[in-house]
Amino acid sequence: MAQLTFREAIARGIAQEMRRDDSVIMLGEDVGAAGGVFKGTVGLLDEFGPVRVRDTPISEQAILGAAMGAAMTGLRPIAEIMFSDFFAVCWDIVVNEIAKSRYMTNGQMTFPLVIRSGNGGGLRFGAQHSQSVENWAMMIPGLKVVVPANATDVIGLMAASIRDDDPVIFLEAKSLYASKMDVPDGDIVDTLGSAKVLRSGADATIVSLGAMVPRALAAAEELGENGINCTVVDVRSLVPLDTSTILREVVATGRLFTVEENPRLCGWGGELSSIVSEEIFYDLDGPIVRITTPHIPLPAADALEDLAIPSVERIVTTIEKAMNS
Amino acid sequence: MAQLTFREAIARGIAQEMRRDDSVIMLGEDVGAAGGVFKGTVGLLDEFGPVRVRDTPISEQAILGAAMGAAMTGLRPIAEIMFSDFFAVCWDIVVNEIAKSRYMTNGQMTFPLVIRSGNGGGLRFGAQHSQSVENWAMMIPGLKVVVPANATDVIGLMAASIRDDDPVIFLEAKSLYASKMDVPDGDIVDTLGSAKVLRSGADATIVSLGAMVPRALAAAEELGENGINCTVVDVRSLVPLDTSTILREVVATGRLFTVEENPRLCGWGGELSSIVSEEIFYDLDGPIVRITTPHIPLPAADALEDLAIPSVERIVTTIEKAMNS
Amino acid sequence: MTTATKPTTAIDLEHRLALYRSQVALRLFETRAYDLFLENLVKGTSHLSLGQEAIAAGVAAAMRETDWTFATYRGHAHTLARGVPMTPVLAELLGRANGLMAGKGGSMHLTSVEHGVMGSYAIIGAHLPIACGAAWSAQYRGTDQVAVCFFGDGTTNIGAFHEALNFAAIWKLPVVFICENNLWMEYTRTTEVTAVAHPAADRAGAYGLESILVDGNDADAVYDVAARAIARARAGEGPSLIEAETYRHGGHSRADPGKYRPDEEVAQWKAKDPVPRYRARLVELGVDEATLVAIESEVADEVEAATEAAKAGAIPGEDLLMKDVWANGGSSWRN
Amino acid sequence: MTTATKPTTAIDLEHRLALYRSQVALRLFETRAYDLFLENLVKGTSHLSLGQEAIAAGVAAAMRETDWTFATYRGHAHTLARGVPMTPVLAELLGRANGLMAGKGGSMHLTSVEHGVMGSYAIIGAHLPIACGAAWSAQYRGTDQVAVCFFGDGTTNIGAFHEALNFAAIWKLPVVFICENNLWMEYTRTTEVTAVAHPAADRAGAYGLESILVDGNDADAVYDVAARAIARARAGEGPSLIEAETYRHGGHSRADPGKYRPDEEVAQWKAKDPVPRYRARLVELGVDEATLVAIESEVADEVEAATEAAKAGAIPGEDLLMKDVWANGGSSWRN
Ligand SMILES: Cc1ncc(C[n+]2csc(CCOP(=O)(O)OP(=O)(O)O)c2C)c(N)n1
Ligand SMILES: Cc1ncc(C[n+]2csc(CCOP(=O)(O)OP(=O)(O)O)c2C)c(N)n1
Ligand SMILES: [Mg+2]
Ligand SMILES: [Mg+2]
């Protein structure tokens, strides 16, 4: 057992897999000597050397193209896209090439690669460095999408993502990088497509992801004190999606609340809502309510950003209002 | 009154606005001399000359960057992105620059521009030339998203989009380009954010968009013969979204079916479903059912593509099954 | 600028005959593909290499079996030149289950990993970085494989071109970029929208590379320049960028008659048609007519047989539709 | 390659004093911004131009009021150099309602349309095509406005750079691209990941442009080369690409101490610090100490006053949050 930050867990998860498998290699801007701008790859250059841990130019299409070409020829690259907002400059390689090529070739190629990226707001970086893009990735057939919410999950899900034979978009909530927890010693390998029930309550089910998980939990504590007992689910991977756990937990309480960091329209919460109201409509006791960032670009100022992203307080008041009406 | 194809309507809509406003200019690959690869801009070079109708290199970022820079300095550019799949190579300019810059500058800039693009499947072009990306655009705060389903709407909505002071993503269903209809003479100017009720029925509401509209209508005819009477709504613009019309029509029947061409996850249908189950849950008489392309890249072969995209038959059987269970 | 129009590598007759056969095969295959398109049997689109055969044939002849080809939507020729049989390629164009990718890819995405054809890519420029990745993998794994990446003149103006060239240069990757300069994008002349006269060769210096221009309608010259570039790449000396000047006889795609091009220009280039030109060279070198006719008729028979076999292919169904999104063979996004 | 280290345009003393004042203002402003960052008052990030002031000052001096600046996340200097007052800029860094964009943009997105500052862009390369668009608009409307676009050395390796340069060249757009080569990307040396020694100047030829290199720590030289490029653009002679060699004194952003750089390199460049260098030149030209001290203290007072005014700004609230997504002032996506 050792106390680890979320950012340290990234390097540990990668190192764990690089040690056991020579085919795992890494590339990105400033990932080597600098250890990553978020310090997520500190120590990897020292341990694995500049042949396996490579700094790149500011050429995101080249970075992901290189990862794709390497994956199709037998390696397991891990590429970093520094901020997930930058997916926009290499989106073609992600969605038109990596995501589609296995299907288009009728299975002739596999793409065992991981694209890590710092995701979401909370650091007052403004509209071009703060987006939550988990829905961008979820909407593209052929991509797996993993979003851990704590250090232990980072290691286990990173290992599972690296071992997975499909392309995984691995989104690291920037606002969680500094968060700490006790992490078990030794190798940790988790499973994609398994949501976690973090708390059980009879009245409502709150489904959350990434940086919204600790907020959902805190809100549930507060709601519990006010007599509303909530189940809290951490989705952990959007694709594959653990619909069985989620549906079971919604059936149990009859109410679903989703807490998302991505802006309002076409978020994963809307997708979950639509799955629920298609598949277990008759188990619902009331409206499905989504708590999201409003449909606006994220503002930079701390005061404004705090108003935009779902807060514990907003989660509490929204659920209270819905449950009491 | 003249019979016009959908593709002819594009040129007519653009010409109508270029005649009245010198600040409307156009650029894109092969839009000039060739009249566009889909022949949507035939005649415009002749009428407006090479200064207002400009052919570009294969540089989608430059095309949209140019449109953005021109818009912020007082022009009203219309840029063509040949296939909507190619948004992936210039996504940054769309989502990080065009969509966000007004907000980020606290309203110092406006971006009256239109980005037209051939969208969706049906032409057996395979996975990289057939995507329906209306949900890509809908999920980005700061973009308006317009998807006409017939020639008259093309003209009126094109005019409204060009006159609108915000960036509009104007998606032209490739499978509708050859469709014809009688179009009134004279200028046509429509309104963004107004859905159309094309047919009324007491039993269920089918909401559809673009190329799915004629299919939804045909399905409703067939269902009507089998005793299930459906309302059919053509959404026409996803942003602004005419929620009042849609919610009213769903309340009236108590059932909602959405018919989408975009792949399953995080489509506009999911968004609509979540709005409905949040806002008019108690008016629903049964599950909300989404009819979509499965969550796969689109295959090229005609037989396979026809299995993938929602067909009249699939719409009919899905609704029948849902209504009879 | 190196202008490599005359072969500096001796090519023996056997290889010359193979080069001829390859060019004839590409010519007859593409002609058949066009006919089938006009018969409405090719359902989607198709982009032919008629007139450009010398490049695909010449480069493939310089490659080893273990090397990799990265092609574009205009990729029939590059695929066949690597030894992929005609039947699955034609069946793919026809959308049949016996197609190279069972109909799921179509004309623009021909891929045969077995033959080192690592995909045909239909978004302009995207495969240049991907070819870098394969080359990086060869470099990392210490194999001596080389990635060869084809693209058109118009493609030099997109961002991915620039990123890939710089990336390949700094990592000294074993990748050979081959620009098939056929003067035209779709319907726009490339020089009208390009700041330099030779869209690839004039930009090599921006990546610290040698500027190489070759007569793309001369299979020997292409073979020669490709062989040298591939050898360099294999020896760890890094990437090359080759501009091969050529012309497409037909339109850009589908039934485009290519009417935007001046008649004289078309005529001038048809006079430089690589296939009769190569035939004439062989005759000059003493090859007898009978040998050439035999090659031509064998290839014609092959095309005929492939056409029949492709037409006889089954129509793909639901089982294929939902297959192979994921490595586990399935397409489910949920558990 | 044109190396423009010596001014060829006569600059009169009045302009020289203005250039000095401008550089001092940028220096003192950035120093204050850094202090406020260390005081935890700048909440997000910030990228300073300490050491690079001569470029922003020199170029701005060569621009007309109606010309346009396109800057990056490292854009404080370029914004101030165009005459934007310090208070709203500093208040923006502090996230206050009296900020240049009421706190909605932050340090990386400074914009003042009123002063021709058409935005600061934080995605590498994105603003180069956008500057082309503004230049196209000037060309179309027949004004003689020029767009000036700043970016760093590392930015030359991204696709948008390539697309924009070609596009500007073929349309002969009135745009001047200025690469501030400070040798480093964030924490990686640019030459380590760039195929040519001069990331911009060595690539100008790929766009048919003249290769121009200038001492970016000499405001007169910068002024001179910029004035000529702007004049060319205004005269309809098309774009220019200028590489200005410089160095950032501090780290890339925030509290980065920049320790990845060799001490000698930092020392060597600090010896070429543009501000004392320019001061020395003025003294040499006979300007008396009192004049210089007066300028310096006026600027110091301005910074002080701006600091107070910025700190006194209100905290922005919900009303601003939901404002100005759309041209109608609102943010509603539904009716
Ligand atoms: C990013 C992108 N933009 C546009 C297109 C449409 N497109 C397909 S082929 C083509 C012309 C390509 O010209 P060139 O590179 O010269 O190759 P050629 O077709 O002549 O072989 C265009 C514009 C595309 N496929 N991808
Ligand atoms: C597309 C993209 N990739 C990466 C980044 C992260 N990033 C911000 S600044 C920077 C370094 C830029 O270096 P340079 O162009 O030399 O400019 P400088 O900061 O030195 O002025 C990087 C990599 C970004 N903002 N956008
Ligand atoms: Mg071409
Ligand atoms: Mg730099």
Image (spheres, coloured by chain):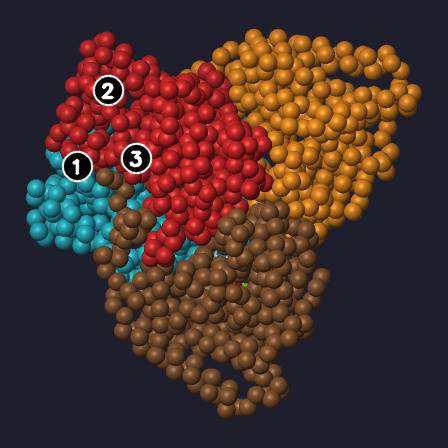
Chain colours: A red, B cyan, C brown, D orange
Looking at the image, is mark 3 or mark 1 nearer the viewer? 3
Q: Earlier in the sequence, mark 1 or mark 2?
A: 2
Residue named by callout 1: A279
Question: With respect to residue C298, does D136 lie above or below?
Answer: above
The residue carrying mark 1 has its beta carbon less than 8 Å from ligand 1: no
> What label does residue A199 carry, if any?
2
Indicate which disc, 3 or 2, sits on the residue closer to the N terminus.
3
Q: Is mark 2 within 8 Å of ligand 2?
A: no
Query: Disc 3 versus disc 2: distance between alpha carbons?
Result: 20 Å
Q: Residue at x 59, y 79 (%)?
A: C12
Q: Chain of mark 2?
A: A
The residue sitting at 38% across, 43% down in the picture is A167
Q: Secondary structure at mark 1?
A: helix
Q: Are marks 3 and 2 in contact (CB under 8 Å)?
A: no
Name the amino acid, label 3.
Thr
Nearest the viewer among A245 and B306 is A245
Tell me the element at label 3: loop
Question: Can you see residue B252?
Answer: no
Q: Is residue D175 left or right of residue D290?
A: left
The CA distance from mark 1 to mark 2 is 24 Å
Q: Distance from label 3 to label 1 (Cα)?
A: 25 Å
- In the image, which is nearer the foreground, mark 1 or mark 2? 2
Q: How many marks?
A: 3
Residue A266 location (% of width, % of height): 33, 35
Residue that appears at 60% across and 10% down: D309
Residue B130 in the image: x percent, y percent? Answer: 37, 53
Q: Within the image, what quadrant is residue C200 found in?
A: bottom right
Q: Which mark is residue A191?
A: 3
Which quadrant: the C terminus of chain D?
top left
Subunit under mark 3: A
Mark 3 or 2: the one toward you: 3
Mark toward the start of the polypeptide (3 vs 1): 3
